Amino acid sequence: MSSSRKSLSDPGASPIPKANKFRFGLIVSQWHEDITGPLAQGAIDTLLKYGAMDEAIYRIDVPGTFELPMGARLLNARTKLDAIICIGCVIKGETAHNEYINQAVANGLIQFSLMSGIPTVFGVLTPNNLEQALDRAGGKHGNKGIEAALTAIQMANIKQGSRESGTSIGFGQTNLSS
């Protein structure tokens, strides 16, 4: 689905819950640090803006985007987290390498999320060129790190709400809003 808005980093009228009761993991790829650095900072600033405590944000850096799923697993093994944000950037090149990396990372993160029960946000840019990446790392299309953090807050809140209310997913009650 396409959006007519150029920057999706502003949640608009969507209510964002307070983040002060959650613990967040942030896994950041060091590859394309000129892109992932601003994305990570956007995520951190957003978590803090919505009330997350500095000491409740756990960050580890990994060499590249391919290592994000293992980074999530390793950080999750160290501390109890309510949501994890994975930040990376894979710019299309002359070969199909980017497709293999993107598919592997997406599959790894969804598998981790489903197996661990920890909402894991795919904050990976998959642009065709550096200009598109910069446009999404604080440029004319906003900062996708902000969007990833907003998603993490919302998913942590949904997870907590389902835990507190005893809500089940499946053939029983499916409304997770609280």
Image (tube, grey):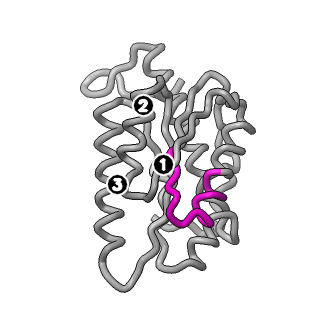
Q: Mark 1 or mark 3: name the one nearer the start of the chain.
A: 1
Q: Which mark is residue 86?
A: 1
- Per the rendered image, the range of residues in magenta is 27-40
Quadrant (top left, top right, bottom left, bottom right) of the C terminus: top right
Which sits in the foreground, 61 or 177? 61
Q: Residue at x 28, y 67 (%)?
A: 100
Are the residues flagged by discs 1 and 3 in contact, CB closer than 8 Å? no
- Residue 142 is left or right of residue 63, and the answer is right
Are the residues flagged by discs 3 and 2 in contact, CB closer than 8 Å? no
Q: Mark 1 or mark 2: name the one nearer the start of the chain.
A: 2
The verdict on residue 31 being magenta is yes
On screen, residue 148 above or below 8: above
Residue behind mark 2 = 76
Find numbered disc 2 in the image and state the secondary structure of the residue it sits on.
helix
How far apart in space, not on screen, are marks 3 and 2 (Cα)? 18 Å
Q: Mark 3 or mark 2: name the one nearer the start of the chain.
A: 2
Quadrant (top left, top right, bottom left, bottom right) of the N terminus: bottom left
Amino acid of disc 2:
Asn
Q: Residue at x 66, y 27 (%)?
A: 55
Q: Residue furthest bottom?
A: 94
Are the residues flagged by discs 1 and 2 in contact, CB closer than 8 Å? no
Amino acid of disc 3:
Ala
**Residue 70 % position (x, y):** 36, 44
On screen, residue 68 above or below 120: below
On screen, residue 147 above or below 133: above
On screen, residue 152 above or below 177: below
The verdict on residue 118 being magenta is no
**Residue 132 % position (x, y):** 57, 76
**Residue 91 % position (x, y):** 46, 73
- Residue 83 is left or right of residue 118, and the answer is right
